[in-house]
Amino acid sequence: MTRPFDRRFPQLAARLPRRRLADLPTPLELAPRLGAALGLPALLIKRDDLSGQAYGGNKLRKLEYLLGEALARGCDTVLTFGAAGSNHALATAVYASQLGLECHAILSEQVQTPWVADTLRWHLQLGTQLTPAASYAQMLEAAANIRARHPGGAERMYEIPWGGSSPLGTIGFVAAGFEMAAQLADMGMQGPVRIYVACGTMGSVAGLVLGLHLAGSHATVVAVPILPMERIAAPAIAALCDAASRLMQEQDASVPACPDPQSRFEFRSGFLGAGYAQATREGIEAMCLAEELAGLKTETTYTAKALACLIADARSGRLDGAVPVFWQTLNSQPKPPGLGAVDIARLPVDLRRYL
Ligand SMILES: Cc1ncc(COP(=O)(O)O)c(C=O)c1O
């Protein structure tokens, strides 16, 4: 089925590289029990956890374009970056392996969470080449070494930035904005809508802002940062909107501009707590409510913090009649069998402490 974004910009769809990997559209569902517990007439959940059969979550939308470009360029390997428990690095490895591409992931340190160990075991099972790094400078140095040593030459290695949030990857979420606008229209949602999204490398929020605008939707994106403010900021989100917008216009001059993107989203620090991957009390409460009342699994690094913001707004009256949407960005597909049996001696020493 042709996706709404491709229908609106067929020339762009024909020119951008893409490999179809995702099951789209993902469902947009009412969560009546969770909504009622928060005193809301309606609460919607965007089920991006179901975006892919092997591994769902928000990253697959970006990877369709990024891995599509890797294949179009004739690359045989991808190289990406993330924290030790990065969902992005794992999603990249899962789909690179499906496409017959080798995957290198350079992983930085993070605080321990209950999810890191299985992520690393899954990488081992996939055969991801893992390189630990203690600092940003070390990550860049490791990347330069890997590129220089690549047997096919550096040009056969496709580099994917943190979180897949290059301008091209961001376009995956521009398309998600069109998908959401179409679903809201189908549901007859005429009034104000507020979409809560965990914001890390910013591509999901930037793409959504752009996509909703281009699709003519007035829904507000609420960006909930899960990294410290020096890494994520409203002007950086706006700059990524501009870069993705320029990239689309280069391929198709009929794509309208998005003036003043910064006025089109709300940036809500205050739910991060002590830092990246550090659990917060509000996040743990949100995680428990989501599981108990909506059967939805979140986690304390990203999704529970975005949901905590939605819950706080519901309780404080800030929603003011708007229908809130929680964008479930976390994978919910089951882990593959056999993770317990992987040979952890193959894990670089500096990563073994997470196991
Ligand atoms: C589960 C989850 N939610 C949200 C995000 C944030 O998305 P983005 O990096 O596009 O801001 C990430 C990745 O960083 C993630 O893994």
Image (cartoon, helix red, strand yellow):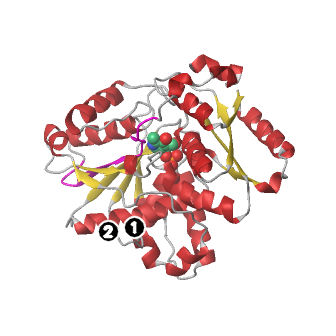
Q: Is 315 left, or right, of 133 in this rendering?
A: left
- Residue under numbered circle 2: 182
Query: What span is in magenta?
Result: 319-335
Name which residue lies at 58% across and 50% down.
98
* Residue in front for this viewpoint, 118 or 242: 118
Q: For disc 1, does the CB lie below 8 Å from ligand 1?
A: no
Name which residue lies at 81% across and 42% down.
144
Name the secondary structure under disc 2.
Answer: helix
Q: Is 62 left, or right, of 294 in this rendering?
A: right
- Residue under numbered circle 1: 178
The answer to which image quadrant residue 7 occupies is: bottom left
What type of secondary structure mainly makes up the magenta span? loop
What percent of the width, then of the height, locates residue 269?
A: 43, 39
Question: Could you classify mark 2 by the number of other residues whose Cα lies within 10 Å: few (under 14), some (14-19), or many (20 or more)?
Answer: some
* Residue in front for this viewpoint, 129 or 292: 129
Name which residue lies at 66% across and 37% down.
128
Amino acid type assigned to the residue bearing label 2 in the image: Ala
